[in-house]
Image (cartoon, rainbow, N blue to C red):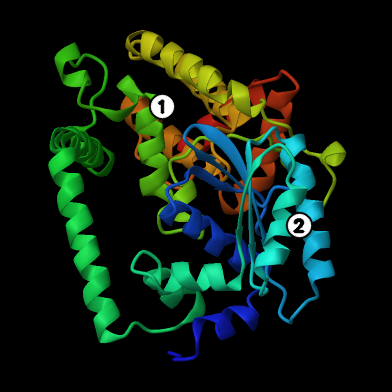
Amino acid sequence: MTTLDTTILLAQWIDGSTRSEYLCADLLDRENYTDIEPQAPRGGGDGRKDVLCKKSGKKWLAAAYFPSTSKSFSDVKSKFTHDFEGVARHKAKGFIFFTNQRLTIDERKKLRELAVGVACRIYDVEGLRVLLDGTRGIDLRLKYLGKEMTKEEQLAFFGKVWTDNARSLKRQSKKIDAIYHQTMALGQTLQSPSLLYGRGVDEAAAVRFPTVNLTTEILRWLHRVTLEETDIPPISLGQLRTTDVWVGKTGTPAKQAVFTPVPADQVPERLEALLAAWRVGYAQLRIYDREDVVQELAHFHHTFLQIHPFMDGNGRLARVILCQQVRELLQKEVFGLFTGTDTEAYYKALQSADAGTIEPLAQLIDLSIG
């Protein structure tokens, strides 16, 4: 742990752009921005948008500039101008610029004057210090800068956490109770093979099981609980993507993409169409022969991956859902489909499905479940 001044720790930043973008995303959350979505913190082109977020329903673009040494105002201005170009490109209504450099009042004013036509907020090293030394940010200071809390700060921080939680619980008790019961029911089903039903079970029993009533909200919940132990930023868990993406090796241009999912603005509609079709056809699936069931599972799996509803973790979530669908409809207990030696064949089967031939994927699923 360190006791160095927060401004010194920020000015001597050595953790690179990935950590700085995650820090800024977390600070946006504390500043009550919503739908916070880091774009490409681990590398690759981000289209001049380190982080996308919303404020009062309007899109904002945020950029981070954390060099490891002191820079001139000319350098800061150049980076600000470069990142601001992304505002028009992504039709944002506001721009937020985070930097670990010290700016004078006049310099901040000059930068804001460059942000023509949109709202602009600038957090220089002093502005960051205020956030990180304040009650709402001292846990982030510990996380990113390794600076421990004083006893007074600990009392203030945990007092605020208690107060906020108490207010939230009181305000949303009914909603929390409903979510709790849904979560318990889903969690129990996912973990208890003895509860899984097969063909011939009455419809009243069917409502207890996860995939029969798959909805967007349930998928968002599954994304959170399935990926909470990964290195995906917590603020991205359970959040549908709001930006266009392409799939390929890190650092390669979009024109060399292996696969391009549906545009972001189509994700909610396409996802709901997939889930609605699954819910409607579920009862019929329970009386299908295995071959027909496997075909439908392959179509669902491939379409889900085509939609690519989340920024990260889509493949893992799709396989979790597939395992559960197999348990329910084929009474087979399977785990970890398409891992290890199966990976290459799996990707080739997906490419065939992209080209309109679903049979290789269906055959691979059939073979994998035994």
* Residue at 83% over, 61% down: 78
* Residue at 77% over, 36% down: 89
Q: Is residue 10 left or right of residue 138?
A: right
Residue indicated by mark 1:
216
**Circle 2 SS class:** helix
User: Which tag, 1 or 2, sits closer to the chain's start?
Assistant: 2
On the image, the x and y values in percent for residue 214 come to 36, 24
Callout 1 amino acid: Thr
Residue 251: numbered disc: none
**Circle 1 SS class:** helix
* Residue at 33% over, 14% down: 286
Q: Is residue 233 left or right of residue 107?
A: left
The answer to whether any part of residue 188 appears in the image is yes
The mark closer to the camera, 1 or 2, is 2
Callout 2 amino acid: Phe
Observer-nearest of 342 and 313: 313
Instruction: Determine whether 101 is above or below 77 in the image.
Output: below
Instruction: Determine whether 161 is above or below 325 in the image.
Output: below
- Pointer 1 local density, CA inside 10 Å: few below 14, some 14–19, many at least 20: some
Tags 1 and 2 in contact by the CB under 8 Å rule? no
Residue indicated by mark 2:
80
On the image, the x and y values in percent for residue 250 come to 76, 53
Instruction: Determine whether 128 is above or below 151 in the image.
Output: above
On the image, the x and y values in percent for residue 294 come to 49, 22
